[in-house]
Image (spheres, helix red, strand yellow):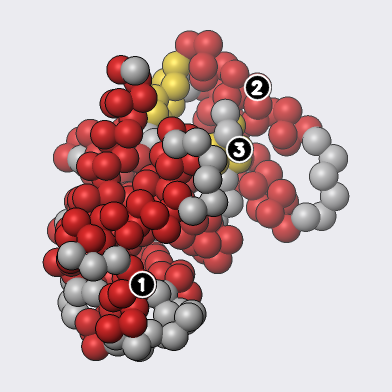
Amino acid sequence: MKDLTNSSIERKNILNNNQAIEEIYINLGFYGLMFENKYRFTKSQVAQYFDVDTRTIDRILENNKEELIYSGYEVYNGVKLKQFKDHILSFLAKEDGNDIDVVTIKQIYGNEIDSLNKTSILGTFTYKAFLNIGMLLTDSENAQRLRSIILDIVIDFLNKKLGGKTKFINQREEDFISSAIREYNYRQVFTNYLDYYITDNKFKYAQLTDKIYKSLFKENANEYRQILNLKSKDSVRSTLYSEVLDLIASYENGFSDYLKRESVSS
């Protein structure tokens, strides 16, 4: 996999994988406060985690503003800021026992409440935006460690989806993990769109997958499985090289978009 600090595509592929992000959140232990259905962090909290000055975060924001807004960075002021502050105060006032996550979050926001009360504008980060900062920071040991953790968890997550271990020689290819993550993300969109836009039919996933394989390879998925003598638990896609995975991902993504456009226009 390419260096996350140098590849916006690699960063986006990981951040678009919600299941992998959930695994990272569970394992990392950096807990945010839920507000409007997303975990939120302030700039000072993000800077403190990475052990850098807030001005360093400002520079990252200035140089990567569009990417970070896409991953969830947002500026609060006026009514929105008041609602956020009130939400924090309400959370701090709750009696939630000794749950370690709750205690940690209360300590983090409790230490910051005075400065929050004095500000009229506040930059906030979702969990994805926080991870995005960690993927961009080059002069932070904590950011380097975070990137290693992210890659370990994502690769472990993906290997489980592919059968639990590196089994086929194509998986040693440098770009395999990147392409597999991208293909997995597009596959999720593809199956979601099949659920949403096509009448319920338990065979539709297999049928349409076979049509894609026939269109690309002139044989269906089962025939390909037989050619490679794969076991029932082996994933066909786990045997494919990155160029082929990218081709399938593009096809599925294009077909998903076609389904959506045809549904809207009909």
Instruction: Give the distance between the C-alpha atoms of the residues marked 1 and 2, in whole angstroms.
Output: 57 Å
Report the residue at 65% width, 31% height from top: 88
User: On the rendered structure, is 97 left or right of 37?
Assistant: right
Report the residue at 45% width, 16% height from top: 77
Residue 146, image x and y in percent? 39, 65
User: On the rendered structure, is 140 left or right of 246?
Assistant: right
- The answer to whether residue 154 is above or below residue 81 is below
Disc 1 target residue: 222
Q: Quadrant of residue 49?
A: bottom left
In front: label 3 or label 1: 1
Residue 256, image x and y in percent? 31, 40
Q: Earlier in the sequence, mark 2 or mark 3?
A: 3
Q: Nearer the viewer, residue 53 or 26?
A: 26
In front: label 1 or label 2: 1
Disc 2 target residue: 86
Name the amino acid type tagged 1.
Asn
Disc 3 target residue: 34
